Amino acid sequence: MCCGERTETQEETAKRSKEIDEELKKARKFSDSKVKLLLLGTGDSGKSTFVKQMKVIHKDGFSVSEVAKFQSVLQENCLSSMQRVLLCEQLKVSKKLKKDRESVLEAEELKECMDSIKNLWADKTIKEAFDKRSEWRIQIPSTADYFFNNVERFADENFQPTPDDMFRAKLKTTGISEVSFELGGIEFTIVDVGGQRSERRKWLHCFDDVTSVVYLAALDEYDMKLEEDNTTNRLEESLRLFGEVTASNFFQPTSWILFLNKSDLFAEKIKKRPLNQFFDDIAEEDAQDFAQSCKYIQRRYESNFKGSRLYPYVTCAIDTSNCKRVFTAVRDTVITGALNDAGF
């Protein structure tokens, strides 16, 4: 024993032992409970992609039937995205690509026009249209360039989608979908509901027994219009909705988690379309800086927040390692909050 140390008395030892036993009892009590996370957000914010990541990280990934479904979804995504680009009024296709344009617009399946899409995507005017999709109001997934770059593989009759392919697939969520898994002795259920305006009336049915709400907001949508009406700014719609749901009296979850999603696309976009081109209250030197730009968008959401506790995270839903790290932090936040609310 080092000089100056004293031995614990029997009374102190018994007290400490009792405290440890109490903590273990609390932990066991909570570990028997269930955590329900509700995913909210506007359309195309990344909710379904996050659910897919949870399946890969915490379950057995995708079933055979799900892989088969995504095969046709990805093929349709690729074809319809190029068709929408070609129908843009501002786009002027060169004479040498007229036949390719007609081939794509008349095609019903990707394999019918795979070569034409390759030819079109190799042309600088098509790439320019993709870069200006927000300005020209071309409603295509932000991952459309991934589809075009992989068109030959997608069109192959033996095409088997990889997890990376499926993370980028665009399929509107209608109704309510759930994924459940156990982690650290706690059963988590993540509920995903459609984000389009027509789907939001179904949200009320999901509010029962919610532990926390995860609200997804796409960082890159500051210059984009809603697919539903092609006139409303997506960021403004998301901010308005965030204010409404966090002020709702229908339920008061333990905590609100804000995912500022699509950080990869945001980092690239602000280089070409800095935030100061759209907002007067951000300094020019900050408008192309990733960290400062993220903070700016975060502050906009924080100013609209009407709940009690908010935990923001910058995320990239197509990045598995990022989702794994973020969900670990969310798990700890949710459990700590639930324990505190329960008086533990």
Image (cartoon, rainbow, N blue to C red):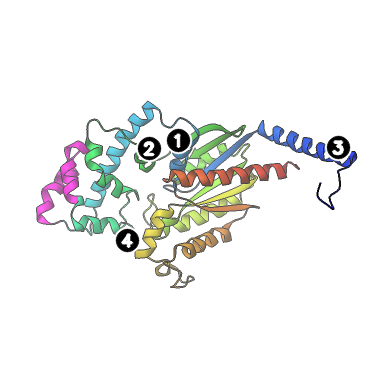
Q: Which residue is mark 2?
A: 163
Of the image marks 4 and 1, the number of the one nearer the N terminus: 1
Q: Magenta segment, which residues?
A: 94-120
Q: Are marks 1 and 2 in contact (CB under 8 Å)?
A: yes
Q: Which residue is mark 3?
A: 14
Asked whether residue 54 is in view, the answer is: yes
Q: Which residue is mark 4?
A: 135
Q: Are marks 1 and 3 in contact (CB under 8 Å)?
A: no
65 is higher (above) or lower (below) than 102:
above
Q: Using the numbered discs, state the Cα–Cα distance from disc 4 to disc 1 in whole angstroms.
A: 35 Å
327 is higher (above) or lower (below) than 137:
above
Of labels 1 and 3, the one closer to you:
3
How many labels, in total? 4
Give me the residue at 81% from left, 50% from top: 2
Q: Is 170 on the left-hand or right-hand side of 45? A: left
Of the image marks 2 and 4, the number of the one nearer the N terminus: 4
Q: Within the image, what quadrant is residue 243 found in?
A: bottom right
Secondary structure under tag 3 reads helix
Mark number displayed over residue 25: none
Of 232 and 341, the residue lying toward us:
341
